[in-house]
């Protein structure tokens, strides 16, 4: 028997954000606290707005018990519409997936979220009219295809007080100006061989490419304009290594095309390769990621299986799966995909670091796995990318401005399941492996990565809600309610103060980060030289190439191949790979780690782990006694505060004594 509490005395109203509208609500909804068969729970009101689904109980009414570490935008009983994964109704103890129009309304509602929370609501005590309204409202607003302009992002931007991008404070480089690209070239010493171009200003050449990007110095702006249809196949610079080798990316050619197009492409490529085969571009290794890594479809399938292990309905289910945990985990193939991606990043790092070879990543649109590999290589090789602002700038450069289709890949508009694939989550999972293997090397924590993964589904930030810079720019202009008209002012996710108070933000920073020692002025020259030696590995003498220049006689062969069929086939990199890879990997792991130099993840056997904080955080049975790493972090933060305040006191005493 469930004892029915009297309906709530005081009226509980949801807290609405600017632009948020209440669409439907239902009273006396019972939310199970945890589905353990005991039916414990609490009564409240279930509401649906144009931003979220929220459950309000007695506690929601009082402000006293607001914990400091709560997200300011999304409460613990709030689910943004983009975060809803699937909705099930329970009819006579049978679960049924709810989509579209409903003939019959369920007595229980189960909502599975993309951040792996599971909510159970009992509607037995709710008025029939209200059940119809709330269930059809929730299903309609969270599961049916939407227009881009219907996203809450636009309602919020037009109603919110002028949020003139306050992200200047956190030093994240946005890469939306020519200046940003020039600074990055200078920072990585890439400006010797590469230049930032303005050819695409006003998107006059291609809507797929950003306004500004970096190409080899030898590519003239005229040639880009002349072959504009080919522009998608221009070599785009990602990053330069300290030894001058660079990481580049390029889209693969379409398989079918007519003769005139392929003639033009041949001319265009000829031009590029003629210039790129002269010093200083001697060596270039091409890697077609679509043939050497799993397909997006495989990644999506593996992740769908993997997340099922954590979307657990009740305690009984948890213990039933716990017995077969390892075999279930293995059969999802998700950890194997992470291993393959990390291994590919190590291979690329070896070419750049040890063989001093430029690497060109090729993929159909160069906006999915190219982003994953190029970001990982930079996190592994460039200690700046392991700071918080450096990592955020990297995501801006490679993903947001680089044109990763967040809208399609996260399926934010519910347009097509075919396009969906957790590519960005795959990157965060790979970076997490590095963070947990080498904590002192990172200025941010795993909590930072978890919160970042949750922010994928919060549509008040524009960062993860467009497919390209062009799409964002064309949708920027709009009628704003406050000003008569004018462009929307979107927030960026990198302004963490929107979601968290300073106390909570402390958990995003790693108190044990090994900061880079500042070089002493008097010893500056020697210090710089030493640093380069640490970065480099013991250089095994690479055979000096007899054919200077980029595989001279292979150039024609290369162009024929690029135009004729997929690349990957003619590159014989796999022949010499295993030995040199293994030697590079083992030799690095046999030396002490330099937290500011190259970092290689350990990828053997059980080294690849499940990101427990993200995936297990809502399952009470899986929690650690004593609180695990987050509790340790909290203790360390307290200790640091104490040390700092003692330091201040000592300084005061000292100055008084003087």
Image (cartoon, helix red, strand yellow):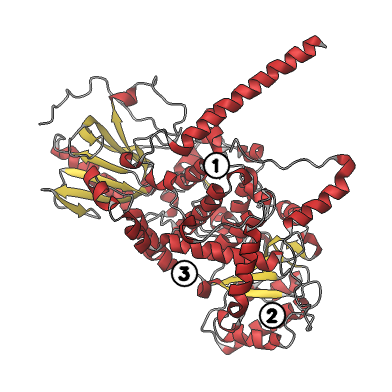
Residue projecting furthest to the front? 590
Instruction: Find residue 221 and report its image quarter.
Output: bottom right
Foreground of the two, 134 or 86: 86
- Disc ID at residue 445: 1
Above or below: residue 61 compared with residue 433:
above
Q: What residue sits 48% from the left and 36% below the top? A: 630
Q: What residue sits 47% from the left and 26% below the top? A: 68
Q: What residue sits 13% from the left and 30% below the top? A: 2
Above or below: residue 552 compared with residue 221:
below
- Disc ID at residue 268: 2
Coordinates of residue 247 in the picture (x, y in percent): 67, 65
Eye-nearest disc, 1 or 2: 1
Coordinates of residue 451 in the picture (x, y in percent): 48, 42
Q: Earlier in the sequence, mark 3 or mark 1?
A: 3
- Quarter holding the N terminus is top left
Foreground of the two, 579 or 413: 579
Q: Is residue 609 left or right of residue 656?
A: left
Residue at label 3?
294
Coordinates of residue 311 in the picture (x, y in percent): 31, 49
Few, some or many residues within 10 Å of mark 3 (<14, 14–19, 20+) = some
Q: Is residue 108 left or right of residue 370?
A: left
Q: Earlier in the sequence, mark 3 or mark 2?
A: 2
Gap in Å between the C-alphas at discs 3 and 1?
Answer: 28 Å
Evaluate whether residue 483 shows in this view. no
Above or below: residue 238 compared with residue 452:
below
Mark 3 and mark 1 residues within 8 Å of each other at the beta carbon: no
Coordinates of residue 484 in the picture (x, y in percent): 54, 39
Foreground of the two, 342 or 152: 342
């Amino acid at each position: 028997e469930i004892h029915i509490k009297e309906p709530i005395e005081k009226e509980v109203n949801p807290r609405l954000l600017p632009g948020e509208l209440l669409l439907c609500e239902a009273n006396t909804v019972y939310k199970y606290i945890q589905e353990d068969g005991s039916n414990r729970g609490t009564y409240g009101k279930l509401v649906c707005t144009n931003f979220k689904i929220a459950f309000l109980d007695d506690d929601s009414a009082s402000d006293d018990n607001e914990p400091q570490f709560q997200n300011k935008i999304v409460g613990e009983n709030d689910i943004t519409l983009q975060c809803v994964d699937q909705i099930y109704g329970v009819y006579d103890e049978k679960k049924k997936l709810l989509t579209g129009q409903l003939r019959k309304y369920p007595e229980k509602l189960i909502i599975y979220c993309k951040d792996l929370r599971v909510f159970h609501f009992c509607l037995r005590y709710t008025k029939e009219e209200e059940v119809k309204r709330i269930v059809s409202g929730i299903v309609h607003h969270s599961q049916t295809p939407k227009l881009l302009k219907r996203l809450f992002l636009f309602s919020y931007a037009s109603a919110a007080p002028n949020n003139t991008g306050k992200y200047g404070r956190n030093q994240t480089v946005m890469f939306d100006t020519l200046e940003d690209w020039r600074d990055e070239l200078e920072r990585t010493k890439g400006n010797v061989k590469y230049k930032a171009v303005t050819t695409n200003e006003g998107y006059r050449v291609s809507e797929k490419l950003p306004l500004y990007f970096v190409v080899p110095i030898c590519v003239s702006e005229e040639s880009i304009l002349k072959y504009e249809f080919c522009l998608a196949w221009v070599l785009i610079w990602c990053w330069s290594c300290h030894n001058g080798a660079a990481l580049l990316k390029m889209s693969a050619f379409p398989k079918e095309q007519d003769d005139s197009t392929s003639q033009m492409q041949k001319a265009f490529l000829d031009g590029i390769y003629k210039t790129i085969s002269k010093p200083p571009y001697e060596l270039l290794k091409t890697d077609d990621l679509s043939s050497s890594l799993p397909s997006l479809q495989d990644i999506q399938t593996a992740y769908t299986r993997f997340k099922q292990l954590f979307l657990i309905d009740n305690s009984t289910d948890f213990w039933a799966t716990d017995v077969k945990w390892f075999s279930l985990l293995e059969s999802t193939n998700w950890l194997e995909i992470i291993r393959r991606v990390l291994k590919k990043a190590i291979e690329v790092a070896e070419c750049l670091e040890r063989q001093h070879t430029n690497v060109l990543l090729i993929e159909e649109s160069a906006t999915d796995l190219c982003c994953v590999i190029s970001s990982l290589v930079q996190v592994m090789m460039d200690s700046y990318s392991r700071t918080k602002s450096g990592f955020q700038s990297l995501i801006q450069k490679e993903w947001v401005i680089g044109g990763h289709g967040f809208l399609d890949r996260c399926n934010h508009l519910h347009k097509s399941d075919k396009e969906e694939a957790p590519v960005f989550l795959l990157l965060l999972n790979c970076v997490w492996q590095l963070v947990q293997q080498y904590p002192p090397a990172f200025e941010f924590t795993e909590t930072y990565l978890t919160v970042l993964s949750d922010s994928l589904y919060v549509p008040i930030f524009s960062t993860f809600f467009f497919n390209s810079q062009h799409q964002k720019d064309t949708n920027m202009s709009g009628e704003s309610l406050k000003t008569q008209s004018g462009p929307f002012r979107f927030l960026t996710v990198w302004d963490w103060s929107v979601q968290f108070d300073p106390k909570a933000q402390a958990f995003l920073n790693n108190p044990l980060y090994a900061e880079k020692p500042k070089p002493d002025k008097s010893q500056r020259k020697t210090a710089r030289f030493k640093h380069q030696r640490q970065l480099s590995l013991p250089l095994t003498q690479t055979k000096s190439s007899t054919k200077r220049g980029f595989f001279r006689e292979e150039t024609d062969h290369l162009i024929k191949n690029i135009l004729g069929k997929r690349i990957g086939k003619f590159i014989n990199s796999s022949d010499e790979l295993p030995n040199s890879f293994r030697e590079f990997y083992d030799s690095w792991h046999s030396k002490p780690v330099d937290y500011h130099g190259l970092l290689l993840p350990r990828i053997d056997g059980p080294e690849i782990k499940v990101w427990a904080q993200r995936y297990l955080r809502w399952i009470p049975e899986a929690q650690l006694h004593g609180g695990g790493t987050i509790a340790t972090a909290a203790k360390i933060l307290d200790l640091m505060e104490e040390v700092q305040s003692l330091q201040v006191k000592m300084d005061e005493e000292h100055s008084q004594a003087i």
